[in-house]
Image (cartoon, rainbow, N blue to C red):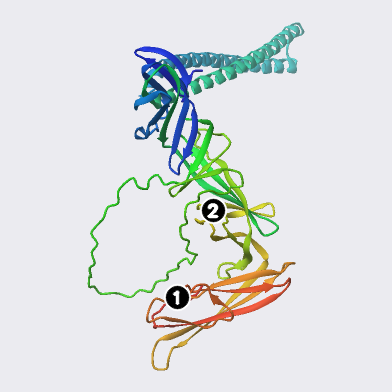
Amino acid sequence: MMRQSFLTGIFLVLGASLHAQTVLPIRSVLMYPDRAQITRKDQVKLAAGKNRIIVGNVSPNLSPDTLRAACAPDCTIVEISSRLDRFAEAVRPRIQALEKKLAAVQEKRDSVAQAVSRNAFVLTFTNQLGAAAGRVIGEETIRPGESSRWRNAFTFIQNEKSARKKVIQKLEDDLRRVDLELQAVQRELNQAKSDGEKTARTIEVRINALRATTAELQISYNITGASWSISYGATLQKDGGVTLEMFGDAIQSTGEDWKNVSLGFSTANTQRGIDRPKLRAFRLRVNEMRVQQVYKLDERGAGNEIADAEPASEAETGGVTQIETGGTALVFRVPEAQTVDSSNRPQKIPLAKFNLKPVESYFRVVPSISTSAVFAVKLKNDRVFPLLAGPVDLFRAGRFTGKTRLAYVPGSSEFTLGFAEDRNIMVNRNVIRNRGNASIIGDNKLLTREIRFEAENRGKESAEVRIYETVPVSELQEVVVTVTQTGGFKEEKAGSGIYSQRFTLAPGAKVSASLTYTVKAPPDFPEHMIDR
């Protein structure tokens, strides 16, 4: 079966005569988050003077303005260009031939199906005759002289039934074979029509050679329809450390299969710097209007702020890949040749694997959300390259425990991974609510919240436990929040409203703690806003 292919052929033309045909294979691919850079390279024979190289059946996703070519030795690139070709006319004769073949097979199938129908009708009639003859013989109403003739007729009918069944079975087998043939021709026709709808680019390179020589020709271009993203696998070890694996998830549907190529993954943002930033007028104004006061609850994250780090100059990836740096981008180079087909299916390629020692580990509990504890491990990225943001598959004790997401972590910075919940650490939370007047004269109300905790270690080993609780932070002058009793809790960051306390629990031990705060607010303040 003939089929259009995206295997690139290269033709050497001198004047108007065709001299040779060879293959210019893809040697390397550098993937970006939204595209890829393709490099083709091979030895070609050049005649002295002007030469024209034609590279056909290149993916239509090629960006013409990114075409580049280089030639050495003793040759110069004069011009490089591309054009868009369609396969419709080339495939039309094949489509017409397959349509005729499909009609012939369909006619054959109709003929066999009709034969099956006729024989089935005869078999049904024969069954009816056999049933009637059987009843006549069984009733014994026939004269003795006619008995043998009825029996002969019955035997003939039975033989005819057997013969018809064999014919029908053979015809049904033929029908199944014709159906398979019909399906095969239909698939081939669908493929031919699909090929006819395809487009491709043809690249033309004009070269001047000082003398007849064999030179190395390199063509590179950017192509859309390809992208990559990063993902991780984090395995908690028995010593408390974490083995971190980095993967590049490559995906492409460019129409070109990348077979045994040198593959790289770049972190550069190709969209940055394409357009010059535009300035707009910056004006300050005041619009006077009647303001209606509305109370709102604003929940904000209180994660650690991470500053950008300098790009890495060299790094250790556990021997999985080499790292190149340029500007603010990293390039992970995979040492072994890789194959990424144009199937639009993600392919996971290892980029790095290394062990990180724990800075600290503890059981993190947020009782207002869940009474169970999550085992958290704080780690330090001791690589000189940053960890890019991406999803993380978590493993503990040889089992998959869930997924999380890693934010951007510069080199030498700390980050925390939380593994599966541990049912051995339980923390119960109880809120005592009181309401009164803020003063004898005023009508402001005073809301008191006492939050009591009871932590228990049901496991067989000591555990460091951290309990986290939030206290509302007021940005309103008329609403005043005061922590009256910390009970050992400390605010994580001034003004954050996030409090925590650490406990070391022996096996079977229990410990209690409490945190109390008051809210002085106007009478119309909605009380439910401070309850969680």
Is any part of residue 189 visible from this angle? no
Q: Is residue 425 above or below residue 183?
A: below
Q: Amino acid at mark 1?
A: Val
- Quadrant of the rendered structure where residue 64 is? top left
* Number of numbered discs overlaid on the protein picture: 2
Q: Amino acid at mark 2?
A: Val
The residue at the far bottom in this view is: 440
In this view of the protein, which residue sits in the foreground, 161 or 233? Answer: 233
Residue 477 is situated, as x and y percent measured from the top left of the image, at: 37, 80
Q: What residue is drawn where x is 37% and y is 25%?
A: 76
Q: Is residue 234 left or right of residue 8?
A: right
The residue at the far right in this view is: 144
In this view of the protein, which residue sits in the foreground, 274 or 323? Answer: 323
Earlier sequence position, callout 2 versus callout 1:
2
* Inter-mark Cα distance, 2 to 1: 38 Å
Residue 336 is situated, as x and y percent measured from the top left of the image, at: 58, 36
Q: Assess whether mark 1 and mark 2 are in contact (beta carbons under 8 angstroms).
A: no
Q: Is residue 19 above or below residue 59?
A: above
Q: What residue is drawn where x is 64% and y is 70%?
A: 465
Disc 1 designates what residue?
473
Local SS, label 1: loop
Q: Which mark is residue 384?
A: 2
Residue 226 is situated, as x and y percent measured from the top left of the image, at: 45, 38
Q: Is residue 395 left or right of residue 73?
A: right
Q: What residue is drawn where x is 58% and y is 59%?
A: 380
Q: Which mark is residue 220?
A: none
